[in-house]
Image: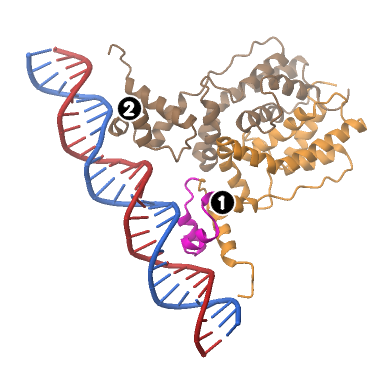
Chain colours: A orange, B brown, C blue, D red
DNA sequence: ACGATACGAGACGGTTCCGTATCGAAAAGA
DNA sequence: TCTTTTCGATACGGAACCGTCTCGTATCGT
């Protein structure tokens, strides 16, 4: 083939993501099933990855979306954009796969650290927007930035991961969350 | 033994919860392991439950805590209490076990419905407190109750399930969440 | 004290997956 | 074109569990 970059690698990783998206959990996922789905011999997989763990890491890396770049007009609009990006990825399969990873994150400190490494850039972005809001006076001066981030991202992720509140519409939710947290529940 | 109520049942269910709390996922969990841990023959398990699924259902039922009864003094204090109860259970093992169930909830509509059935009473409670707040004027008249519940419970559950924000102290978090959402992020 | 019952332990055949090894066909390089 | 890799497929032994079944023992009601 003139296509240099290893058709086999691609097929194996695609098969892995497909199987995960179809409902396989991480333990259920077997090398044999991946090989069959990819139309590849098992040996071909073992020739490239030492085991399931390493293959999964490579496969999941592919799902990681691009860190969004906030427009920078108003703090409110930037927050809506960032909250809308929470738990959303380029690949539609990610929505099915992400919840499967929750148990893994809590299983070992190593996985926890890896997870934190992945989401830290996005968190950093939101922290900066919040600080900007404090400086500009759009947000209250005594704002606790860490708590504020929890208030903004928690509800969105909860909804994306397990539709915690069945009545909520996911599309308008980012706006509702941001405005709700901005204005508060007390009468003004 | 004078203790009537089936020592074996108890031992089997306890062993199941123990193994889950120690890091077994639901698929990894084997009847053989449960039997060994409980000091029980496999047949004894199959004599009481048709399979792993049914046993798990019974075991998890044991974890479900009591629905808290809000004191009813101020809406703010009631909310702090309810938010503090989100994702908390009588059994300390529940903290380790709950995240393992996230993938199951998304796997089948049946599991999703079961999950909703379990949390609905708690959600109802919070809805009532919020409505009371609207009537009494403690909360704004145009409050969207469903969104408000997401704002309050989402951050707490996120933190309990996967320590999403490593810097946050879980003990004071309910207060911080409630006050944050009550007052909002805009300057007053 | 004795028969009925429930128990633990574990053997059993069957299934699935592991990771390795082999082999002929196809591709790539010289 | 001929050699050298790389590939797919598949066989293999080993491991873990499945759900059933059979032991010999302990417990319990009467």
Q: Is residue D25 left or right of residue A39?
A: left
| Element type at mark 2 | loop
Q: Which quarter of the picture shows residue B167? A: top right
Q: Could you tell me which chain the residue with mark 1 belongs to? A: A
Q: Nearer the viewer, residue B145 or D30?
A: D30
Q: Is residue A39 left or right of residue B175?
A: left
Q: Nearer the viewer, residue C29 or B152?
A: C29
Q: Are marks 2 and 1 on the same chain?
A: no
Q: Could you tell me which chain the residue with mark 2 belongs to? A: B
Residue under circle 1?
A54
Is mark 2 in CB contact (under 8 Å) with mark 1?
Answer: no
Q: Is residue B102 visible?
A: yes
Q: Residue at x 80, y 21 (%)?
A: A186
Magenta-colored stretch includes residue A52: yes
| Element type at mark 1 | helix
Q: Which mark is residue A85?
A: none
Question: What is the x, y in percent for residue A50?
Answer: 52, 54
Q: Residue at x 65, y 16 (%)?
A: B81
Q: Is residue B148 above or below residue A123?
A: above
Magenta-colored stretch includes residue B165: no
Extent of the magenta region: A27-53
Residue under circle 2?
B39
Q: Nearer the viewer, residue A74 or B96?
A: B96
Q: Is residue B158 above or below residue C14?
A: above
Question: What is the x, y in percent for residue A69?
Answer: 81, 47
């Amino acid at each position: 083939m003139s296509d240099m970059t290893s058709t086999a690698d691609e097929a194996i990783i695609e098969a892995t993501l497909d199987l995960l998206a179809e409902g396989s959990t991480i333990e259920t996922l077997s090398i044999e099933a991946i090989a069959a789905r990819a139309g590849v011999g098992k040996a071909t997989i073992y020739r490239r990855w030492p085991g399931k763990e390493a293959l999964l890491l490579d496969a999941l890396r592919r799902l990681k979306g691009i860190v969004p770049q906030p427009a920078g007009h108003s703090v409110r609009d930037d927050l809506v954009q960032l909250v809308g990006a929470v738990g959303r990825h380029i690949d539609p399969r990610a929505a099915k796969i992400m919840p499967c990873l929750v148990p893994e994150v809590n299983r070992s400190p190593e996985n926890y650290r890896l997870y934190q490494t992945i989401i830290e850039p996005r968190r950093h972005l939101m922290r900066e927007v919040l600080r900007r809001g404090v400086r500009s006076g759009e947000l209250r001066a005594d704002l606790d930035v860490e708590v504020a981030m929890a208030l903004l991202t928690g509800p969105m992720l909860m909804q994306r991961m397990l539709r915690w509140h069945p009545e909520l519409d996911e599309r308008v939710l980012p706006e509702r969350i941001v405005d709700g947290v901005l204005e508060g529940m007390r009468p003004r």
